[in-house]
Image (tube, rainbow, N blue to C red):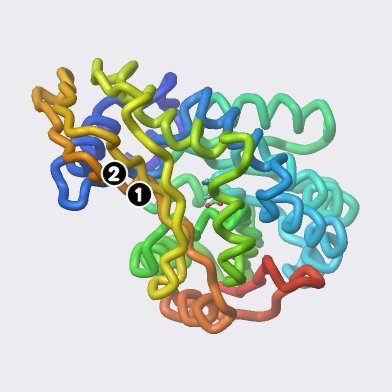
Amino acid sequence: MESAAQEVPYGGERIATVMADVRAGLLARPKRLPPWLFYDARGSALFEEITRLPEYYPTRTERAILTDHAAEMIDAAGSPASLVELGAGSATKTRVIIAALLERRPDATFLPVDVSPTALAGAARDLRVRFPSLEVTPVVAKYPEELGFLRAAPSPRLVLFLGSNIGNYEPSEGSHLLGALHGRLRAGDALLLATDLRKDPSVLVPAYDDAAGVTAAFNKNVLTRLNRQLGARFDLATFKHVARWNARRSRIEMHLESLTPQVVPVPALGVTVSLRAGERIHTESSYKYTFRMVKRMLGVAGFTWQRAWTDPRGWFALHLASA
Ligand code: AVJ
């Protein structure tokens, strides 16, 4: 079961998983769709575009922290034999860590892990050109369900969970994911966890509702994906992109709001979805953390928080925790 994740790439997309998650989400109240559905080929390209937007500070802030401190991070993690990156995507930010690691351990292995085979293939190709001596083992897997591939990663390992991707998980799910990860690690292994930090909504909201409308297109693209994969008949023009700050839960939320009352057939699921005017489909939560929240989450999962690196404005942090 577990090794199947590595040996049988999805060949594009796993239709059974898409169907199960979409069915559950569209029948729920309030309606929701899981954010992993964003990342088909077009969604992954749109996300790359988001990372270059002036309003979207997380990627460039994280990259600056990594660039300034990569060598220190690798030393603090004990110069690991393998680097495992969960949700690697195009793995462009990871290059600076890989370069720092190879200086200390030329024999190091890199295992980029992602649900998107497209992004992964591109990342592997690029890294093999840039770092010809680096052993790259791409893994198509969904976590926390499919972490069995970790057995094959040489110890000690450093697991990277960058991009504040943890922010997409509900706190309980995040602890569960990190706990499942901890259960697969050994003494001497470490985790480098990136978290976006809580800050003024005047900075947060535009980062998820940019002037150029790229995030709106990214959000709506999930409906295009359902039209293509499930034969659904969502009309994108009848939905509005909504991004809002939920202070109580310390998260940005993205929704797709129906502008009219409508009934949308989803033939592959054998259902029709009714929406009222103003009804929203919740497509993403992006949690914004305090150090306290991060330490608690890591502690619940069994990790020991060791130290963190942040930018001068204190907008983003990379935390090192030991297994
Ligand atoms: C990839 C989950 C970190 O939450 O900021 C960007 C995704 N959504 N703009 C984030 C995203 C809308 C992003 N993460």
Which residue is depicted at the point 85% across and 47% down?
Answer: 99
- Look at the picture and state if 311 lies above or below 214: below
Residue 64 image point, x, y percent: 82, 57
Disc 2 crowd rating (10 Å Cα; few below 14, some 14-19, many 20+) is: many
> Measured from the top left, where is residue 159 in percent x and y?
61, 57
Element assignment for label 1: loop
> Which three-letter amino acid code belongs to the residue tagged 1?
Glu
The part of the image, by quadrant, that contains residue 306 is bottom right
- Name which residue lies at 83% across and 35% down: 131
Q: Mark 1 — residue?
A: 145
Three-letter residue code for mark 2: Ile
Viewport quadrant of the C terminus: bottom right
Q: Position of residue 18 (x, y in %)?
A: 29, 31
Q: Is residue 223 above or below residue 216?
A: above
**Which disc is residue 281 wearing?**
2
Q: Indicate the quadrant containing the N terminus: top left, top right, bottom left or bottom right.
A: top left
Q: Nearer the viewer, mark 1 or mark 2?
A: 2
Q: Nearer the viewer, residue 50 or 193?
A: 50
User: Which mark is on residue 272?
Assistant: none
Instruction: Identify the residue at horizontal 90%, vertical 52% (top origin).
Output: 103
Q: Could one spot residue 61 in this view of the protein?
A: yes
